[in-house]
Image: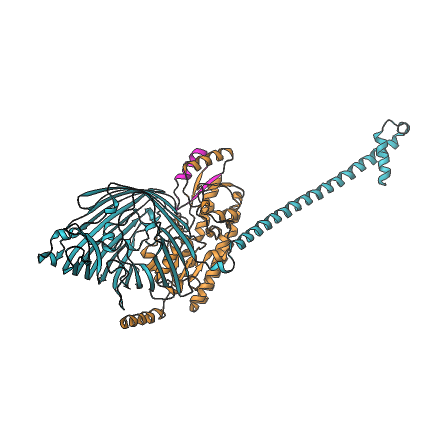
Amino acid sequence: MSTKRAMVLAVAAALGCSPAALAATDDDLRDLREQVRQLKALYETRIQALEKRLQEAEQSARKAEAVAGKAETAASQAAVQASSRPTGENAMNPGVSLMLNGVYGNLSQNRDGFKINGFIPTLGDVGPPKRGLSLGESELAFAANADHHFRGTLIAAISPDNNGAEIEEAHIQTLSLSNGFTIKAGRFFSGVGYHNQIHAHAWDFVDAPLANKVFLGNQLAEDGVQFKWVAPTELYFDAGLELGRGRKFPGGPDGGRNKNGFGSSNLFAHLGGDIGASAAWQAGLSYLGTSPQDRSYDDLDSTGTNVTNSLSGRSRLWVVDGVLKWAPNGNPTYTNIKLQGEYFRRREDGNLTYDTAAASRGTQTGGFASRQSGWYLQGVYQFIPMWRVGYRYDRLNSGTTGLGLFDSGVLTAADFPILESYNPTRHTLMADWNPSEFSRIRLQFARDTSRRGAIDNQLFLQYIMSLGAHGAHKF
Amino acid sequence: MKRLLTLLVTIWFVAFAAPAAATLNVFACEPEWAALVREIAGDKATVSSATTALQDPHRIEARPSLIARMRTADLVVCSGAELEIGWLPLLLTQAGNARIQPGNPGYLEASQYVTRIEIPASFDRSQGDIHPGGNPHIQTDPRNITKVAEAVIERLVQLDAANAQAYRTRGKMFLDRWRAAIQRWEQRAAPLRGVPIVVYHKDWSYFRDWIGLREVGSLEPKPGIPPTSAHLAELVNRMQREPAKIIIYSAYSSPKAAEFLSERTRIPAVMLPYTVGGSDAAKDLFGLFEDTITRLLAAAK
């Protein structure tokens, strides 16, 4: 039966009231019905087939879409991977990081007259931060491997007040030595004690311990070479030797002596290990020997004149340091405690020249001998994520300084007021907020008796931010 | 000056003398890699892990004991992709060990062997502590472990040719078992497909993609930034509108934030081992995935 005929019949059936239909016999009607039934069945199967095909088409379209989507993600990922790769010369740029810090200071004593009584002043400024708002030193650091043998680091401190940039550290370090040896050369923070090697932005308090101020002039960076060896033992042990120019206090004069060879040597050794999973410790011993030549400082003599004195001789400093860190299960993210302390002991012998410029009672030289010590102990506790509190106690013992010029009666103790025996102390409290690894805002209060007869109450509010390459901090 | 020169020359010679080791010393940064090397090397290597499952691998201290271990290591296996950037570079430069410096056969970065995801299109710390190299938590997808295992086998063979056969045999045995286990896990985890989850940190992304979970939020407001109350409050609101089915956090994360959200939204919070040792059942790599899936299935019911 052709479709056309069937259609005609179907139309006829639908128009059941046509005269032709009325005239039809029962047989015809049966025929017609049968044809309509067949027609219906036929169309149903066709429609089903069509529906099925439609469904299949839809499904494959969806699949194609998904595949396209995946391809797109992959393409964009690849694009990201490609674009994130620096090209050409820039690809080898050293890692750069920048530290910004600023302080607000409120000090009850005038900072300009800052001194630490009982101790020979160092060659630089060791005072607390300024009164009022001030920008601290900005640190700019570059570091990269030079090749497979050497790594280079430069850290410059940019002074906020037109004093230009000072090189804090600029050194190369070996990578390819084995058996535990590393050699560092250039300018680096001396491995004397613990605190001295830490950059100011990573200090737990705004300023350095008093002992570091009087014995190391705040922080000793030496031009020299460092040899270090790590023992192949389970208990950590290292030993090292640094030979330097003696460019800074306690060497001297400022900038180092004009001679071949070296002006300072530092020997150090550390032990370290774990106590269970939660605690780790390190203890160190170091000896710094220098031979200051005409290391000068200013003092007010008995006539009220500002005179320059200078010391030539030997300076030997011993430092014992220890640090203990604790965190539950060794995970410092939530809470952790850090205890740190150092004990300094120094002997200085030689000749002290009074009034080198002959500005007051005339230049005179006599023997000099001092045995001095100092220590600090500090603890920092992170009690919840982001928040830490800390306390530090500082104490210095000046001992009695032996002066030939005083013993022989040429000059009086009043001509060397700063050397008069005195034991400064300081209490420091701090709290800081660290919204991320890269920023810190700190409030600190200190009660400092560095100056005889004057208690300095110091309040600081400080920010420290770290930008750029992610730094790794020493234990 | 002469003395100094003599000293230098002596150090130079001593330092370059090649050492001889009986078994390979392997320093793994994370427990999963320590476990993997143990599977492949057996008694041919002495393996230790720098971190435990209870420590956040992003931030541990560069402890003296780790420098001591790095000093004698023949092979260092780490996740890489900057996961250990806060401590590993220090260990590498302090240890005085040339064998394990990056670029040498003694240094293996697992993330180099897998396709990393979540590589940020732009880098800015205002987005949190993001990793320019992509998400470093690659071990949560067992298929990545297969790829790393293949690399570890080749590396062990290269470093210790005398035992090459042993590494290949053990390695193949491990991979056969591992591939079978992956199929088993995929079948077991089928009911988890499409289940919406809230994570603590972005350390489950590879697992999520493998199983087909749907991540609808994280407890950290930004990667590496601890949960804040404002962010948690926002999350509570969001969960009331379109609830997730499970809140997951890793063994090394504090459960506090997850429990807080769980209490207010009645969504179960589940601790997952994250790595070997993170739970009693996660004694090895097999146990790790077995236990992870068991815990998720129990929570999804």
Q: Which residues are magenta?
A: B243-267
Counting from the top left corner in percent of width and height, residue A81 is at 53, 54
Above-or-below relation of B192 to B28: above
Residue A118 visible to an observer of this rendering:
no
Describe the colour scheme in one phrase: by chain
Q: In the rendering, at what x and y percent does residue A33 appear?
A: 83, 33
With A56 as the anchor, is A179 left or right in this view?
A: left
Q: Residue at x 71, y 44 (%)?
A: A53
Chain letter of the cyan region:
A
Front one among A74 and A201? A201
Q: Position of residue B43 (x, y in %)?
A: 39, 62
User: Residue furthest toward the front?
Assistant: A359
Depth check: give the residue in front, A337 or A428. A428
Q: Quadrant of residue A176?
A: bottom left
On the rendered structure, is A343 left or right of A24? left
Does the stretch in magenta take in B41?
no
Residue A269 x, y percent position in the rendering: 26, 60
Front position in the image: B178 or B264: B264
In front: A466, or A157? A157
Answer whether residue A175 is visible to the viewer in this image. Answer: yes
The answer to whether A218 is drawn above or below residue B156 in the figure is: above
Residue B266 included in the magenta stretch of the image: yes
Q: Which residue: 73% across, 42% down?
A: A49
Name the quadrant containing residue A168.
Answer: bottom left
Position of residue A199 relative to residue A178, above or below, is above
B23 vs A369, left or right, is right
Quadrant in which the N terminus of chain B is drawn: bottom left
Q: Which chain is orange?
A: B
Q: Quadrant of residue B105?
A: bottom left
Q: Residue at x 12, y 52 (%)?
A: A413
